[in-house]
Amino acid sequence: GGALAYVIFSKKDASEIPIISIFFPKSEPLINEGGENENGKIEIITKKEVKKRDEVLTVIYDNPVSSASNAGSGFLRYLDKTAGHAYESDFHGDNVSKLSNTTILNIFNVSWGKDSNSAILNFLNNEGKIQNFSAEFSGSSTAGFFLPENTVSAEASKIETKIAYIVKENGRGIVFVSDTNGKNKKQIISLPLSEFSVVWRDKENLYLISAPSALSKGFLYSLNLKTKELDKIY
């Protein structure tokens, strides 16, 4: 209070008083282009032009979608979240065609496969449980098979028409690889833990990531599909 009274009656700038200057720092002098500053000196300011890149957003589809994938040749493929129908269009939202009339509700995640001709669909059934469906889009319908109910994680390969998934059995995690239609199923390895997410990014290896935890560090492993060797990356 005393400091404020001192400023008022002495007509001094508050920024000149040490205590008040902490809260009210002296502002920079306002200088106009080619004009005078507060000291009466004429200064010329060179304005810097900021070039902003014009960004154009295009609405591809009006309804919510579960996921979208680049199908190549300038086309996208996506699933309608409300009904699970599969569509294809160009990047401008034109030339729309429906790939599948099969209704699958409550899809919350999609892992697209090679050329976006197949995908693993994660959705909630009527009991609120997560189900994994390996889908192939053919004609106007969706064909495929359900992965086991105790599937922990599943991923479609973008290199070949195969899928990988982890099944929890007796507390262990069993890693399987099969065709997208479920044929040629092979067990790759049995892990002492089941809480892993499987990622497929190249032809030779799968990558296993431990489940997130605030109590322990995470782990990342590579699993060679030919030698079945498990190497710790992190």
Image (tube, rainbow, N blue to C red):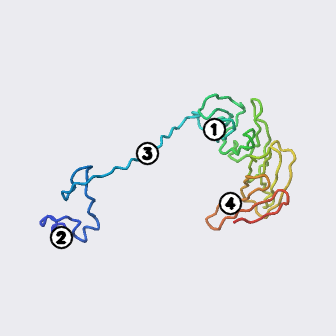
Classify mark 3: helix, strand or loop. Answer: loop
Query: Which of the marked residues, 1 or 3, is nearer the chain's N terminus?
Result: 3
Query: Residue 211: which numbered mark, if any?
Result: 4
Task: Classify the position of the C terminus by image quarter.
Answer: bottom right
Say what amino acid the circle numbered 2 marks: Gly
Classify mark 1: helix, strand or loop. Answer: loop
Which residue sits at x=20%, y=57%?
A: 41
- Percent x, y of residue 63: 58, 34
Above/below status of 15 relative to 34? below
From the viewer's perspective, tell me whether residue 75 is left or right of residue 48.
Answer: right
Q: Nearer the viewer, mark 4 or mark 3?
A: 3
Query: Which of the marked residues, 2 or 3, is nearer the chain's N terminus?
Result: 2
- Please give the residue where the numbered disc 3 appears in the rendered image: 51
Above/below status of 160 relative to 59? below
Above/below status of 182 relative to 7? above
Q: Nearer the viewer, residue 54 or 62?
A: 54
Which residue sits at x=12%, y=65%?
A: 9
Classify mark 4: helix, strand or loop. Answer: loop
Query: Residue 2: which numbered mark, if any?
Result: 2
Query: Residue 81: which numbered mark, if any?
Result: 1
